[in-house]
Image (cartoon, rainbow, N blue to C red):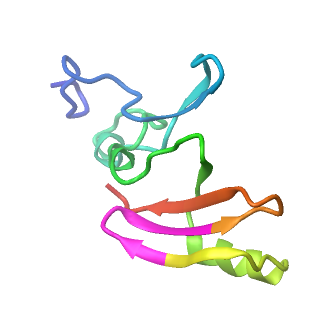
């Protein structure tokens, strides 16, 4: 165990990442930690380690974009106020969090998710 309660010999941060791939070459363009791991922070460990809960529910493919938000209901209401009407799904709760769907003006699918805290 590390000083902050994580099996450091088995896992090292970041625990999860948001990764952008060049879909033509398969090359990773950039990679950043995706969220935080609250038990690590509560035990005095570092922030920006990637949230363990983000491992569930979201898969990004070449057919669309997925964005994360901290307040999906507020974002949904803001988008409506700004004239967005092409929602394919209003915010719906799932075991991993809440998500919604919409299309951009060119018909591309967009998913937006708010993950539950780990």
Estimate the x, y position of residue 47 in percent, counting from the top left: 46, 37
Estimate the x, y position of residue 76 in percent, counting from the top left: 66, 76
Quick one: 86 or 36, which is closer to the camera?
A: 86
Q: Residue furthest left?
A: 1
Q: Is residue 55 magenta?
A: no
Quick one: 27 or 36, which is closer to the camera?
A: 27
Quick one: 20 or 75, which is closer to the camera?
A: 20
The answer to whether 8 appears left or right of 118 in the picture is left
What range is drawn magenta here?
92-101
The residue located at (33%, 43%) in the rendering is: 52
Estimate the x, y position of residue 23 in percent, counting from the top left: 62, 27
Quadrant holding the N terminus: top left
Question: Within the image, what quadrant is residue 84 found in?
Answer: bottom right
Quadrant holding the C terminus: bottom left
The answer to whether 97 appears left or right of 34 in the picture is left
Figure check: 115 above or below 8: below
């Amino acid at each position: 165990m590390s000083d902050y309660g994580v099996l450091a010999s088995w896992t090292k941060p970041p625990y999860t990442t948001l990764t952008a791939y060049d879909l033509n070459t398969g090359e990773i363009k950039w990679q950043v930690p995706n969220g935080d791991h609250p038990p690590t922070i509560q035990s005095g460990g570092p922030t920006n380690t990637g949230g363990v809960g983000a491992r569930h529910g979201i898969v990004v493919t070449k057919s669309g974009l997925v964005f994360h938000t901290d307040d999906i209901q507020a974002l949904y209401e803001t988008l409506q106020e700004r004239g967005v009407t092409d929602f394919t799904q209003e915010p719906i709760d799932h075991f991993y969090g809440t998500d919604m769907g919409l299309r951009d003006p060119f018909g591309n699918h967009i998913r937006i998710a708010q993950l539950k805290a780990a």
